[in-house]
Image (spheres, grey):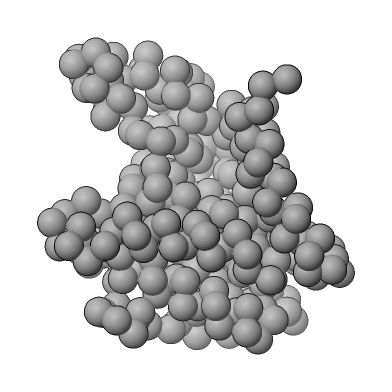
Amino acid sequence: MDAFDRVIAARAKGRPTGMSFISNIFTDFLEMHGDRRFGDDKAVVAGIARLKEMPVTVIALERGGDTKEKIFRNFGMAHPEGYRKALRQMKLAEKFGRPVICFVDTSGAYCGIGAEERGQGQAIAENLMEMMTLKVPVISVFIGEGGSGGALGLAVADEVWMLENAVYSVISPEGCASILWKDSSKVREAANCLKLTAQDLFSLGVIERILEEPDGNNFETIYETLKTELYAKITENQKLPVQELLDRRYNRFRKIGVVK
């Protein structure tokens, strides 16, 4: 598969969404609503749950399944209140010592007038700053499309994992082709240039783990793998002194893009 084929797979109809991962990996999930400032963004699902016996905070960008749900979820494109809801749950997780697990699947943050009026850029920037200093383990898993700052707003983590056919990029191939070449037919060339596949990003040191996807649409193996591996990695990180955890997270991002 070339890069654009991976993009198509990440967007495929019937691909499991954030709620699918939550319901198949965690138990006792209790969703929490609202940012206590404006409203409740349905594109962001956040709450507390158990990973095996471990209490955790889970946050997912949810794009929805059928057309009705996609509209309800705004196709996974979060407003500022969605990022603020996520941050509110992260700060509660820090207060009560719960690890944070994020599932990312969005073409990007919503770019409508209302979102801009309510401070979209500021909300994402605040998440980046606060996640860097959260005193609990944080892991982000890209399960589909990861678009620009909308994805990064939930991806400042100790480790970032990606499914085999997930993608993560500063812009969509369509957007890149329209800006660079003014030619929508160059989407495949744009996708290759963007280095947006899990394989590209692993080789560049942007992510730590690629999760192999099954043939067809049977994700049970991935659910079980994530349940086991997330539990093991979080248990390992919980043993670290807080300052060492924070230093590792900081250094993880400092080394990205360094040319040796």
Image mark count: 0
Residue for point 32% across, 55% down: 121
The spot of residue 214 in percent (x, y) is 60, 42
| Residue 59 in sight here | yes
In front here: 145 or 154? 154
Q: Is residue 257 left or right of residue 224?
A: left
The spot of residue 120 in percent (x, y) is 29, 59
| Residue 66 in sight here | no
Residue for point 58% across, 43% down: 163
**Within the image, what quadrant is residue 259 found in?**
top right
Q: Is residue 204 left or right of residue 53?
A: left
Compared with residue 259, is residue 51 higher up or lower down, i.e. above or below?
A: below
The spot of residue 30 in percent (x, y) is 50, 85
In front here: 37 or 173? 37
Residue for point 53% across, 65% down: 130
Q: Is residue 32 left or right of residue 66?
A: right
Where, quadrant-wise, is the C terminus in this rendering? top right
In front here: 232 or 126? 126
The spot of residue 183 in percent (x, y) is 20, 15
**Within the image, what quadrant is residue 93 found in?**
bottom right
Compared with residue 246, is residue 3 higher up or lower down, i.e. above or below?
A: above
Compared with residue 249, is residue 2 higher up or lower down, i.e. above or below?
A: above
